[in-house]
Amino acid sequence: MKIKEIAIVGLGYVGLPLAISLSKRYKVFGFDINKKRIKELKRNFDETNEINKEQLKKSFKKGFSVSHEKDRLKQSNIYIITVPTPVNKENKPELKPLLDACKTVGKNIKKDDIVVFESTVYPGLTQEICGNELQKHSGLNLEKDFFLGYSPERINPGDKIHTVDKIAKVISSENENVKKILREIYSNVTNGKVFIAKNIMVAEASKVIENAQRDINIAFINEVAKICQKLNISVYDVLDASKTKWNFLPFYPGLVGGHCIGVDPFYLADIAKKHKVKPSVVLSGRKTNDEMSKFIYSQINKKIEKSSKILILGLTFKENVPDLRNSKVFDLIKYFKKSHEVYACDPLVGNISEKKIKLICYENLKKHKFDVIILAVAHKLFIEFEVNKLITFLKKDGMIADLTGIWRDKKEIKNYWSL
Ligand SMILES: NC(=O)c1ccc[n+]([C@@H]2O[C@H](COP(=O)([O-])OP(=O)(O)OC[C@H]3O[C@@H](n4cnc5c(N)ncnc54)[C@H](O)[C@@H]3O)[C@@H](O)[C@H]2O)c1
């Protein structure tokens, strides 16, 4: 099969870097339903901060094109779907974006085309649900007229070391020829680092357990952090000692938000329940991590006066990204707002008016004096902060609460709390 054009469906944190990487070798078309996103990309602006202006300009020059026009998808013969797979209010898989994407792609695929899914799903979903949906809208027969592939994404937003080109990629298909094509395509992205999984279900399972495992490991350390609070020792000091053992896994406590670690375990739990397996460990990890914001709030709240003026540093779900989705810092703010005046500062974040948060820009911090400063997210910029300068934003006897433990050895901070 000759690769005419690869269409990337969903140009977010996963889709855009993949499209840029593939466009070095192939003709690539990027499709997204978000018109604003398409407009911005055409102006060489990526709001996720993953791809810079120069990289975008270069790719467009090489033939990369983007659009929200569905019909344009007809020109491609390989489709890679990278749309969100969130959960609903009951923490059940919300498949609407995936089904919508299948409908759009289904209406545009032709005989012999290949549709690859990168979105994180539970094992079986790609073939049973997406395969059927594609058949329904295309009128073509699965694995006869068109073919499926699955290749989970492992990128780590904000991480400039483990970039797309350096991470081994798991690929899978039920068809030998498609495996060969996917190996060729993805080898170009990852410098040859591809692993062919036994089948699509195995590849799907491999991804979802990677993130569930991370969630459970963090949950264990969060539980340890709670024990350490009672014992009046720092969990970070404990970890410094434990991680000197060769096989100790250094996970860190804190808020687990975002759209991967805090979401994917629910996909695993869902398929487990459907097969009458009780996912006790998976859901216990989720519960422990989801309760962390309340625990952190209660620890800090009992140490401070009522109606304190509080500054929260960092709003995003993790460090060095502008992504606010499912950030547990907002839970923390919600608890504190009940009896305190809360301000927040996050230079990586743009407009968040809908969240009704009092934002202070970095440069204006000096105009305020706070009773409490809470470091919620360890952006590089905050790590580089002069602690002496930070103290000047505090009232006399004000407290610094450091969720990340980075300032725990700073003697200048007289009133300090950490996990
Ligand atoms: N972000 C990560 O770190 C990461 C890492 C590994 C895997 N994943 C998985 O990859 C998938 C995508 O995640 P993301 O973070 O890139 O999401 P995202 O929200 O950043 O991007 C998804 C994009 O898809 C678009 N979209 C939604 N519905 C669409 C449709 N029907 N047709 C076309 N475009 C559509 C959205 O407008 C958005 O631009 C998810 O399944 C996620 O779990 C994400």
Image: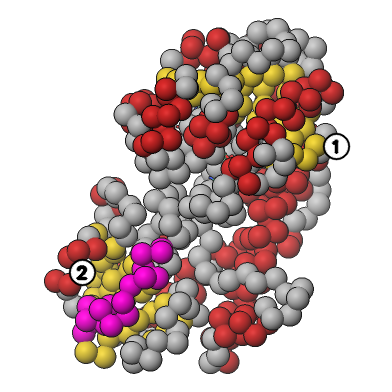
The answer to whether residue 44 of the structure is visible from this angle is yes
Above or below residue 237? Residue 74 is above
Which residue bears the numbered disc 1?
Answer: 198
Q: Residue at point 77% right, 33% down? A: 172
Q: Residue at point 64% right, 19% down? A: 78
Amino acid type, label 2: Leu
Amino acid type, label 1: Lys
Taking the image as shown, residue 263 lies to the left or right of residue 52, namely right
Measuring from the top left, give residue 257's x and y in whole percent.
51, 57
Residue 60: mark in rendering:
none
Quarter of the figure with residue 224:
bottom right
Q: Is residue 366 magenta?
A: no
Which residue bears the numbered disc 2?
Answer: 365
Measuring from the top left, give residue 326's x and y in whole percent.
46, 52
Quarter of the figure with residue 170:
top right
Over which residues does the magenta segment extend?
379-395
Taking the image as shown, residue 35 lies to the left or right of residue 22, namely left
Q: Residue at point 76% right, 16% down? A: 142
Outermost residue to the left: 367
The N terminus sits in image quarter: top right
